[in-house]
Image: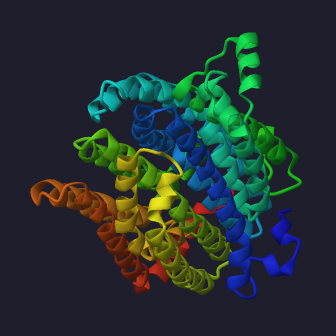
Amino acid sequence: MSIFKDRDEFDLTEGGIARPLFFLSLPIVVTNLMQTAYNLADTFWVGQYNTEALAAISFAFPMVFLLISLGMGISVAGSVLVAQHTGAGEEREAEYAASQTVTFAVLLSVVFGVAGYFLVGPLLDLMGASPGVLPRATGYMQVISLGLVFMFGFLVFVSLMRGYGDTITPMLVMFGSVVLNIVLDPFLIFGFDDNPLFGMLGARALESTLLAATGYTGSGLVGAGVATVFSRSLALVVGLAIMFQGTRGVQINAGDMAPDFEYLRRLLEIGVPASIEGTGRSVSVNLMLFIIGMFPTTVVAGYGIGVRVFSVVFMPAIAVARGVETMSGQNIGAGKEDRAAAANHFAAKAMFVLLSLVGVVTWVAAGPIVDVFTNDPEVVESGATFLRFVAPSFGFIGVMRAYTGGFRGAGKTMIAAAVSIIMLGIVRLPAAWILSQTLNLGSPGVWLSFGISNVVGAVVAYLWFGRETWRDADLTDRGANAAGADD
């Protein structure tokens, strides 16, 4: 059983809302922040390498997001089904849902990884990567594509454990993986030739000795990709061992893992809209690069750093949304729709206050924050300006994420996708083009589009959630169908 089922105060379907949501969400916040640490570690060390490599990361990161987003619907569907079966007290059905999710997640990630390996080069070229950036970004992305099954597999482990109510175990596994990645990064990027880590440690003599013994001068950006894939692969092995053992969180069984294509239909009903949402977000980020690519490399690099820092801020919002998703799913499975709705409203208010305060801090400290990642003053200026434009809208990100998490937990993944498409495709991208190109505001026009779209997304999510139909028979029927017992 989940550790959250062993103590009454962590029962997500009984008692108060704030306490169980906090204890469910806090480990998710930490887990997602550590996941972001993967990207921040790469950005820091690559920033020490050169500006072209840093710009390459700016192009590559959205591509990574795209590959994962194409298959993320399966993990969302598995999480929702496990949560609803758990809330309904159907442990055997939850185990079958988890086992089938793992099977189809592996199959999909292999397909997307192979396709990505051959397509990333042409896609990066199409997005406008410069000749100095393209080969670096392509090499990095090909490594990530080959290791996609490990990266996506670990994401599925986190999702399934979360659906059952165990968010601490994935956090601990992620911690070990992040530490390993941070340790490997400088060695695989720089090798033993002018490695800044040895300079920081005052150990140039040791570096010279190792260089003479190994001759290894590093693999640059490709080395960063290898460090990430290797670290995540070990995390996946640990995650699978935990789920097969079944002593913490949801259990998977080898006998339940033979592909059940009838069950795949059930996963796709919930998962396809979630993939549309994730892919839509990724496509919008990649399309934004067409606009960003019109500006100098220093602006592209500053944007890349700004987005990474921005991701640190909205990761807690995503984490709370995942907590709301689990609470909504388990309470709907238990037939407590009013309690699910109350959890959503509480989370939206709490995240608005918290992230607004974070926005104030970010606005004040934007320059020093970006300066951590690069010593190029033009890049620092671009990244800091981006953060100052976006910071005032941080609270609205929390509102939107809380309500879309509720929609997903209810099985209403299409509504969550619609909110994201409105925010990104209908508001952000057109606004970025019009403000930066048509109105000739330049890069500040792009930065402003982020703030505008964040506010619009929050308003749309709040109004849609507030419709009386959110709690009508259609929602409960949809939840029941999603969590129906296996025949």
Name the spot of residue 148 as percent of width and height, x first: 57, 34
Instruction: Answer left or right for 123 relative to 152.
Output: left
Identify the image's colour scheme: rainbow, by chain, secondary structure or one colour: rainbow
Instruction: Answer left or right for 404 relative to 425.
Output: right
Residue drawn at point x = 46 percent, y = 72 percent: 364
Residue closest to the eye, 205 or 420: 205
Asked whether residue 487 appears in the rendered view, the answer is no
Instruction: Answer left or right for 186 relative to 120.
Output: right
Q: Which image quadrant for residue 213?
A: top right
Residue drawn at point x = 33 percent, y = 63 percent: 450
Count of residue discs: 0
Q: Is residue 46 above or below residue 274?
A: above
Residue closest to the eye, 341 or 126: 126
Q: Which image quadrant for residue 89?
A: bottom right
Quarter in which the N terminus is drawn: bottom right
Instruction: Answer left or right for 398 relative to 127.
Output: right
Residue drawn at point x = 63 percent, y = 63 percent: 483
Name the spot of residue 194 as percent of width and height, x first: 61, 25
Q: Residue furthest left?
A: 438
Name the spot of residue 9 as percent of width and height, x first: 82, 81
Residue drawn at point x = 47 percent, y = 62 percent: 413
Q: Is residue 169 above or below residue 101?
A: below
Name the spot of residue 214 as percent of width and height, x first: 73, 12
Asked whether residue 384 appears in the rendered view, the answer is yes
